[in-house]
């Protein structure tokens, strides 16, 4: 397999497996595509890249060049975005269950604030009165590819229940806040283009009520992220143009219907921008002929947790055997001492031998950022490829990194 003419097998010799590799030109194409679809250059829509998907500074620098903003979830995400040269008013902070210190940090740095609860509003108003405030509304229903990534509805920990939203805006208004946004995000990994216009509908209804009861005019209308990509065996390409057309169809109709004026549409894609740019390159370390064939690789859920966390399935290629017949069904597992460390079960693949390279595709989002050194299996290196040139952008973690944080060896 190759990326931009560079053989993965050559990279594996140069960088040692396991490692993540990102096709950065692909990322640029994704950003251009979503900007075009939503008319971001014409100012109709403002895009905020959800950096939680992948916060590598190299990626943030690409984002900056495309003149789009950042959706950040924590003070340190805000800091990393600022360090990358993103302007404070290009950063939208949406935290959850944050402390007063967290809010102090984001307030003092002048970023846009979107609050997930009324208790955060109380904390924030103790710190100061922001010029603008937005609330994340939970309309009582969710979506999302897996239960774990469904972020709306009664079982979700996110957002302000719709029936309490009015009071939240009223309190902020009484405290002297002058400008407002409204936000919701119902779930991630969605391949149904219709979903997003339904989100507009849910939010517009609520915004309409707030507008009529409190006279608030919204500066922006944020429908969150959630735009899906194809993983294993999903052949339905999510059509971002159709999605945008449907969103604007509803948006224009409902802004008129509820007398909401002309707010800017905000979207916060994460996965759509980086998901298909990343690959995890691993090596087969051991094959066990047990009740079935277990293929062991030199990475585990400590490196790519999505399968263990959500039951997610990634496409997997056996390097150099892409065209060979899928002649066996195997379970692929990692080296972590947990029985959840299984990437896939009964996957049909070409005959696999030790030292083969196994490449996990769609590993650009919610992948390396979730890694950890459990079992003292350290985090991997990351490689970027831009315009046909590969570069090590993060070195692998090592034992010194572990000991550097240890202050006391014996007590
Ligand atoms: C508030 C918010 N916005 C945007 C996103 C990005 O979602 P996605 O990667 O599905 O586009 C997330 C993901 O958790 C989120 O919590």
Image (tube, rainbow, N blue to C red):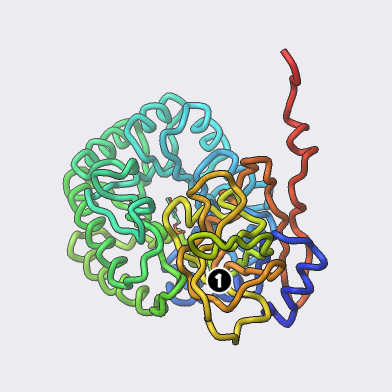
Measured as percent of width and height from the top left, residue 141 is found at 23, 52
Residue 88 as seen in the image, left or right of residue 234:
right
Which quadrant contains ligand 1?
bottom left
Rendered image quadrant of residue 405: top right
Measured as percent of width and height from the top left, residue 138 is found at 28, 47
Measured as percent of width and height from the top left, residue 128 is found at 46, 29
Q: Residue at x 38, y 62 (%)?
A: 265
Front in this rendered view, residue 168 or 394: 394
Image height of 46 relative to 84, above or below: below
Q: Residue at x 77, y 32 (%)?
A: 403
Image height of 355 relative to 111, above or below: below
Does any portion of residue 46 appear in the rendered image? no
Front in this rendered view, residue 383 or 208: 383
Q: Badge 1, how many Cα within 10 Å: few under 14, some, many 20+?
A: many
Rendered image quadrant of residue 390: bottom right
Q: The N terminus lies in which quarter of the figure?
A: bottom right
Rendered image quadrant of residue 245: bottom left
Q: Residue at x 62, y 69 (%)?
A: 359
Residue that mark 1 sits on: 316
Front in this rendered view, residue 393 or 90: 393
Task: In the displayed orientation, state which residue is furthest to the top.
Answer: 411
Measured as percent of width and height from the top left, residue 132 is found at 41, 43
Tally of marks = 1
Q: Residue at x 55, y 71 (%)?
A: 316
Q: The C terminus lies in which quarter of the figure?
A: top right
Which type of secondary structure does the marked residue at label 1 adopt? strand
Image height of 159 relative to 363, above or below: above
Residue 7 as seen in the image, left or right of residue 187:
right
Residue 128 as seen in the image, left or right of residue 303:
left
């Amino acid at each position: 397999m190759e990326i931009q003419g560079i053989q993965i097998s050559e990279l594996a010799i140069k960088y040692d497996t396991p490692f993540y590799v990102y096709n950065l030109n692909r990322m640029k194409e994704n950003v251009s595509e979503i900007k075009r679809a939503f008319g971001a250059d014409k100012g109709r829509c403002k895009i905020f890249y959800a950096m939680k998907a992948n916060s590598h500074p190299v990626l943030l620098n690409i984002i900056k060049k495309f003149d789009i903003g950042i959706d950040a979830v924590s003070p340190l995400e805000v800091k990393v975005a600022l360090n990358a040269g993103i302007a404070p008013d290009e950063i939208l902070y949406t935290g959850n269950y944050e402390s007063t210190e967290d809010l102090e940090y984001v307030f003092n740095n002048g970023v846009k604030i979107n609050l997930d609860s009324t208790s955060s509003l109380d904390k924030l108003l103790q710190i100061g009165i922001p010029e603008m405030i937005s609330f994340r509304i939970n309309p009582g229903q969710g979506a999302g590819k897996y239960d774990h990534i469904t972020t709306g509805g009664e079982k979700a920990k996110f957002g302000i229940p719709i029936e309490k939203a009015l009071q939240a805006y009223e309190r902020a208004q009484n405290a002297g806040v002058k400008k407002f946004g409204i936000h919701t995000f119902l779930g991630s990994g969605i391949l149904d283009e219709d979903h997003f216009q339904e989100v507009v509908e849910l939010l517009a209804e609520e915004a309409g009520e707030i507008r009529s009861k409190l006279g608030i005019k919204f500066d922006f209308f944020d429908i969150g992220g959630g735009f899906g990509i194809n993983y294993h065996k999903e052949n339905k390409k999510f059509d971002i143009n159709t999605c945008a057309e449907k969103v604007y169809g509803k948006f224009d109709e409902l802004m008129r219907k509820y007398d909401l004026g002309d707010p800017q549409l905000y979207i916060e894609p994460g996965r759509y921008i980086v998901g298909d740019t990343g690959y995890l390159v691993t090596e087969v370390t051991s094959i066990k002929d047990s009740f079935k064939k277990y293929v062991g690789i030199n990475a585990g859920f400590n490196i790519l947790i999505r399968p263990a966390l959500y039951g997610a399935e990634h496409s997997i290629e056996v390097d150099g055997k892409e065209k060979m017949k899928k002649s066996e069904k195997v379970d692929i597992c990692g080296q972590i001492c947990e029985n959840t460390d299984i990437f896939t079960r009964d996957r049909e693949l070409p005959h696999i031998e030790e030292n083969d390279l196994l490449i996990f595709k769609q590993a650009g989002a919610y992948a390396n950022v979730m890694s950890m050194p459990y079992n003292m299996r350290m985090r991997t290196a990351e490689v970027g490829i831009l315009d046909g040139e590969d570069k090590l952008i993060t070195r692998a973690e090592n034992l010194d990194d572990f000991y550097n944080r240890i202050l006391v060896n014996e007590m």
